[in-house]
Image (cartoon, rainbow, N blue to C red):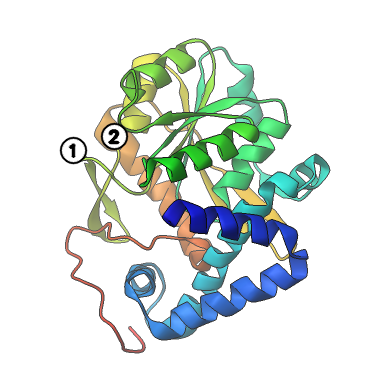
Amino acid sequence: MTDLAYAAGWRMVRLLPERVAAVAFMAAADVAARRGGRGARRLRSNLARVVPPGTDLDRLTRVAMRSYARYWLEVFRLQDISRDRIIGGMRMLDEPRLRDALASSHGTIAALPHMGNWEHAGAWLAANGEPFTTVAERLEPASLFDRFIRFRSALGMEVIPLTGGEQPPFDLLADRLNKGGTVCLLADRDLSADGVPVVFFGATATMPSGPAALALRTGATLLPATLWFDRDGWSVRIHPAVPHTDVARMTQALADAFAEGIAAHPADWHMLQRIWRDEQPAARTGTGT
């Protein structure tokens, strides 16, 4: 039933006029923010960590839920967006850092937080003739996971399952990098039991060790990137490459780059899960910080 609901919604959204679909998604985001369900509460709690005291968290959460709704709207419609719009609508800051890394023979790792529309960023990379490999967390049911794999593959991505594949994903990613390929990884939420402790907005969080470990094993360039929405398009900033030192320091460098981007565009950080070690269950109501 979950897969059928996604399939029906996916098709319906693609059939609707874009403006009508956008209005519907924004209205749904406003309802979700007002109801204050678990995801909205966690988002609000996370945002409270990254914005100055006195920020109107109710308003910020509403705007952030709208940003998250826009992400899903664009995911559902991404296959219908023209290549010209995918490329032309992207504003890439410090693009030479990315181009220089891609032109080398050492492989490139782009590490991103859950910001803006990372699916569109992947589509932009593929549309520019730069194939890449990424990892996907398994979804239930399996048919839904397969649907997302087909969607991403159609955009030009090679997708490796985080668990249950024929080979460990780390070894496959290392192989792609050793051949000069590109790997894109979401890296602000740890899905394992051995995440690296980092200081993130003044408190301890854990982030995955994979990007740094892959860079050290293969010699690949590790580039942090942060993303946000523009009114009529998308923006990405390519941060300076992380120096090869050790996993702990390199992961902290990623966290610092992510924090810089999130602080500049907090409403476009779509983190509806717990990431800080000292976090308690999100409160249901309340205003202010």
Q: Quadrant of residue 66?
A: bottom right
Q: Position of residue 240 (x, y in %)?
A: 52, 37
Left or right of 281, for residue 286:
right
* Viewer-side residue, 248 vs 14: 14
- Which residue is identified by label 2? 209
Q: Quadrant of the C terminus?
A: bottom left
Q: Residues within 10 Å of mark 1 (few under 14, many from 20)?
A: few
Q: Amino acid at mark 1?
A: Asp
Question: As displayed, is residue 18 above or below residue 150?
Answer: below
Left or right of 35, for residue 94:
right
Q: Quadrant of the N terminus?
A: bottom left
Q: Residues within 10 Å of mark 2 (few under 14, many from 20)?
A: some
Q: Secondary structure at mark 2?
A: loop
Q: Position of residue 235 (x, y in %)?
A: 65, 52
Image mark for residue 236: none
Can residue 95 be seen here? no
The residue lying at 80 percent from left, 44 percent from top is 82
Q: Earlier in the sequence, mark 2 or mark 1?
A: 1
Task: Report if the CB atoms under discs 2 and 1 are less than 8 Å apart.
Answer: yes
Q: Position of residue 250 (x, y in %)?
A: 33, 34
- Which residue is identified by label 1? 194
Q: Secondary structure at mark 1?
A: loop
Q: Amino acid at mark 2?
A: Ser
Q: CA distance from mark 2 to mark 1?
A: 8 Å
* Viewer-side residue, 51 vs 9: 9
* Viewer-side residue, 25 vs 204: 25
The residue lying at 74 percent from left, 45 percent from top is 86
Left or right of 278, for residue 126:
right
* Viewer-side residue, 101 vs 275: 275
